[in-house]
Image: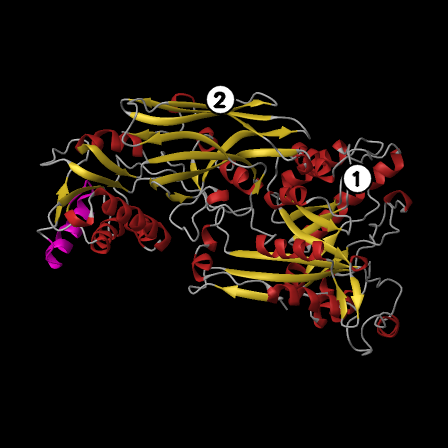
Amino acid sequence: MPLAETSGDDDSFNISRLCGVETDFMADMPHLFSRHIHEGFDFVLAPLMDPSYRPSLMEISNDRPVVLPFVGSEFLLSPSQWSKQVIGKLSTWIDLDSEGDKLRYNSEITLRQEIAWASHLSLKACVLPTPKRVSCANYARFVKEILHNLKGMQLWLRIPLVKFDEDARDAEGLVDSWEMWNSFRLICEHHNQLSIVLDVSNNLPSINSIDRWFGEPVCAAIIHTDSFKTNAKGPFLSRKLQILVTSFFHHSIQVNHHSTYTSTLVTNFIISGLNDRKKTASDLCANETNNFDHDPLRHPLRSYLDYFAYIYRRMVPLSGLELSKIGFRDVLHGPMQPFMDNVDTDILKTSEIDTARYTQYRRAILKALSERISNEEASTVTLVIVIVGPGRGPILTTTLEAAVLSDRKVKVYAVEKNPNTFVYWHNWVLSENLEDIVTVVYSDIRVWEAPEKADILVSDLLGPFGDDLLSPEYLNGAEELLKDDGISIPSSYTSFIEPVTSTKLFNDARSLNNLAHLETRYSVKLYRVASLAPSEPVFTFCHPKTTTNNERHAKIQFKIPHDNGSVLVHGLAGYFDAVLYKNIHLSTEPSRATPDLSSWYPAFFPLRKPVYVALGSPLEVQFWRRCEPTKVWYEWCVTLPTMSSMHNTSGRSYSIDL
């Protein structure tokens, strides 16, 4: 049974935590099931072929077919059991890069036979053996050939998660097992049916090195029994391994790579260390239970299973807000057109429920009002506030709440170009008897002729990348409405980027088979993403404006931590930090993010071709914000350690229309 499962209110998704067991070869699959599945494990990682089998040893007969030594008849288990509760473990002796012709011959035939049999059984996944060396080009080439025709089954490459040491290279120059995985998947061209199962040991690499894997397609983690310590209560993991397991739980390490929407997120753990082969059920009960249990009927690994459940139960549960957004994790959302299109109701509702966002706005407006005029003048002076695009709610009501809290008299002009929200606000003002305080204007702010200058200009036009919803272009015209000493809220905003690894996002963008989808700025609730370096600032805009030129160029150098090891950059994550008023900020930038902010997902700028950055090499990115009378767009490229293509030249794939 699952360690735990959480469902959404609408049952549109669920999160399961599953635990399997790695077994030895056993032709008696029903017994294997009674021993493991019926004792609490969710699935078995089981060999499909007798490990002694070699094609070169089989007799060749022309008058009768050769019966291969598979696990036995497919009818020993039901189709549902094969599909849902068995993961195939391919023969570990396979070595397609061997210099020995016979071993290579046996390996090629056996690998093809086992995958064909697993596909016939409708298994959801098979685990490929760990490459015997970092140079595994023939192995990867062979797997790529199989993947080309493979339908409906994942191949999980088994990779050891071990500490790397620059001073302890092996004969092939291997420093880092990630290098083995990277070379393998590059030859396979990031195929979306190729994933990873991590083989975890006590010899863990650094936290930074481990974090890289959370952007990779990791489907399961194998934990060996010899990685556990024991006490009177049973097995337990070291603090470092506990943190690793908890991190895997948080990152739901299996996802559906075939769809941009994931209805089920699964965390798979596999316990390894039980030796079933050549032992009867009575042997297992008598000989394998003495470590922790004296009950001969209890499964010898049940204590380990219980320990994983214990770790999961100790985790802080997701909030209702986070649960409601699970279906949006790692889903690519294209950019809006704020000038050309009217924002729809669903997007407006998302911002309305963001309490943290409007708490910060309320604080900023309250402070600006209080400092604009003294308490002595408060009863005699009326401050004029212009709201640029009130949308459908919070920014206007927040402004009025701040006026009440500051005990200041205000006159508010709410300028809205969306006819639907204009009607909403017009009726709201009438129903609240606020005609003397609030005037709702149906107009584009750039052409509106204001009856009087404003003391404070309030806008709520920030995008995932700060300026990417054309806040500078909106406010260039609106600032003409400000008094010479007027206040703009926000007063400035800075965009930030950081390099990231995300096989999921890269594959989703390129799966559309269109250049434009690899040169578009997306908005994404980042989840299966690994940050490779701290974010760096890109563009800053100040209001009231200091220049009429909204074009920008930035050259950004990133310092990838040395203990990360080598990395593969799939794209750039974008954030912003906005100064609303003086020391009051609104931020999505990870190191200074506003707590509980939910309106904005980070931006994502994909790279058409992922960039490999070797250990110790620099990473330099250049970014442009380009403007023409009819549109604004971004261009970007990598200039170190290698030169990438220029992305989105002249706005060919993506631009924001004016």
Q: CA distance from mark 1 to mark 2?
A: 41 Å
Marks 1 and 2 close (CB-CB < 8 Å): no
Q: Magenta residues, as a range?
A: 412-434
Q: Is residue 303 left or right of residue 639?
A: right
Depth check, front residue: 274 or 602 = 602
Residue 328 point in image, percent of width and height: 45, 50
* Few, some or many residues within 10 Å of mark 2 (<14, 14–19, 20+): some
Q: Is residue 226 left or right of residue 633?
A: right
Please indicate, yes or no, whether residue 513 appears anywhere in the rendered image.
no
- What is the tally of numbered marks visible in this picture? 2
Residue occupying the point 63% across, 54% down = 248
Q: Is residue 277 magenta?
A: no
Q: Is residue 409 left or right of residue 151?
A: left
Residue occupying the point 15% across, 38% down = 443
Residue 70 point in image, percent of width and height: 80, 55
SS state under label 1: helix
Residue highlighted by disc 2: 646
Q: Amino acid at mark 2?
A: Met
| Colour style of the rendered protein structure | secondary structure
Snapshot quadrant of residue 648: top left
Q: Amino acid at mark 1?
A: Glu
Is 408 above or below relative to 469?
A: below
Image quarter where the C terminus lies is top left
Residue 220 point in image, percent of width and height: 67, 53
SS state under label 2: loop
Residue highlighted by disc 1: 108
Residue 255 point in image, percent of width and height: 57, 51
